[in-house]
Amino acid sequence: MSELTKVTVRMYRYRPPSVSHLPVAKVQEKRVWLTCRYDARNDNMPDALSVAPHVNGVLETSLYVESAARSAEFYRRVFGFNVIAPAAGEGLDHNTRLCAMRAGDRTVLLLFKRGGMPDTDAQGAIHIAFSISRSDLRVWEDWLSRLGIAIESRKRWKHGAEALYFRDPDGHSLEVVTPGGPEYLYEALDYVGQVKVKSIIETYPLAEALKAYQRVAEGKARFCAVLTM
C-alpha cells in the first residue's frame, strides 16, 4: 500500500480533490491550500484516497432517431434547443449521422441516426425527463396543446412533483416535471436533522459582501454564502 507522505488540511472543502489531479489541489477561498501527496511507485492507494472522484452531473444524453434533422427541428420547436453541431453551413438533413443540441445550461442532447454510427446504436423507445419550474406547469400544458402535441398522461409524484408525458417523432417518452413540494422539503430537513448531511457553508465578513454576491451570481457558491458581522 502506498505511503501517505504529506497531508495538510486547513479548510473543509465541499468537493474532495480528485486523485487524478494530485499531487496538488487548490482551495481558492481566502488563499487557503489543501495539499495531499502520495507515493505513486505503488499502484495501491491508501483507503483515504479510494473514494470515487467527484462528477458534476450528466453532461450528455443520447437518443437514437430515424432522422436527426426531423428530430432537431422537433426539439428546437418544442423546447427551444439550439443546434451546436453540425455547425451552421455544414448541412443537417436525413443522412446526418449525429446532431448535438444544447439542452439547457449544462446538458447536451445527442441525436444519433439509427444504424449511422459503427460503435453505438439502439432500438426502441426510451425515456427522458426535463426539469421545469412549478409555476410553468400550466404554461407547458398550453404550449403543447398549441403545438398539437398530445399529452399522454399526467402524474403527481409522492413528494409533490407534477409531470406531463408526451412523445417525440420517434416515439421516445418525454416528461416535463416540476420539483417536489413542501413534503419533500420537510423530508429533506428531517434527513439533515439526523446528521446524515453535512451542510456546506461559505462565510464572508460583511466587508466582503460584494465578493459573496458575485460568487452566488456566478454560480460558484455550491451551497450557500453567509455574511458575518
Image (cartoon, helix red, strand yellow):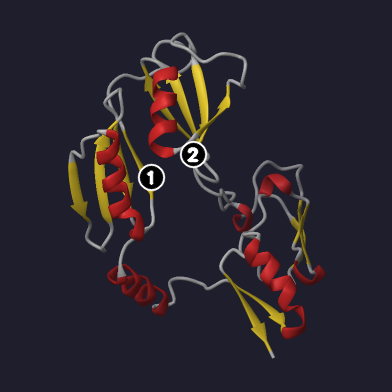
- Circle 1 SS class: strand
Q: Compared to 157, does 55 lie above or below?
A: above
Left or right relative to 107: residue 171: left
Q: Closest to the observer: 212 or 53? A: 212
- Marks 1 and 2: CB-CB under 8 Å? yes
Q: Residue at x 73, y 69 (%)?
A: 9
In the picture of the structure, the residue carrying the numbered disc 2 is: 103
Q: Which mark is residue 130?
A: 1
Q: Where on the picture, by quarter, is residue 195?
A: bottom left
Q: Residue at x 41, y 32 (%)?
A: 77
Q: Amino acid at mark 2?
A: Ala
The picture places residue 131, in percent across and down from the top left corner, at 39, 50
Badge 1 crowding class, 10 Å Cα cut-off, few under 14, some 14 to 19, many 20 or more, is few
Q: Residue at x 49, y 39 (%)?
A: 103
The picture places residue 182, in percent across and down from the top left corner, at 31, 72
The picture places residue 221, in percent across and down from the top left corner, at 63, 65
Q: Closest to the observer: 171 or 186? A: 171
- Alpha-carbon span between mark 1 and mark 2: 9 Å
Q: Residue furthest left?
A: 153
Q: Count how many numbered circles sit on residues in the image.
A: 2
- Circle 2 SS class: loop
Q: Residue furthest right?
A: 31
Left or right relative to 89: residue 125: left
Q: Residue furthest front?
A: 146
Image quadrant occupied by the C terminus: bottom right
Q: Residue furthest top?
A: 95
Badge 2 crowding class, 10 Å Cα cut-off, few under 14, some 14 to 19, many 20 or more, is many
Q: Amino acid at mark 1?
A: Phe
Q: Where on the picture, by quarter, is residue 44?
A: top right
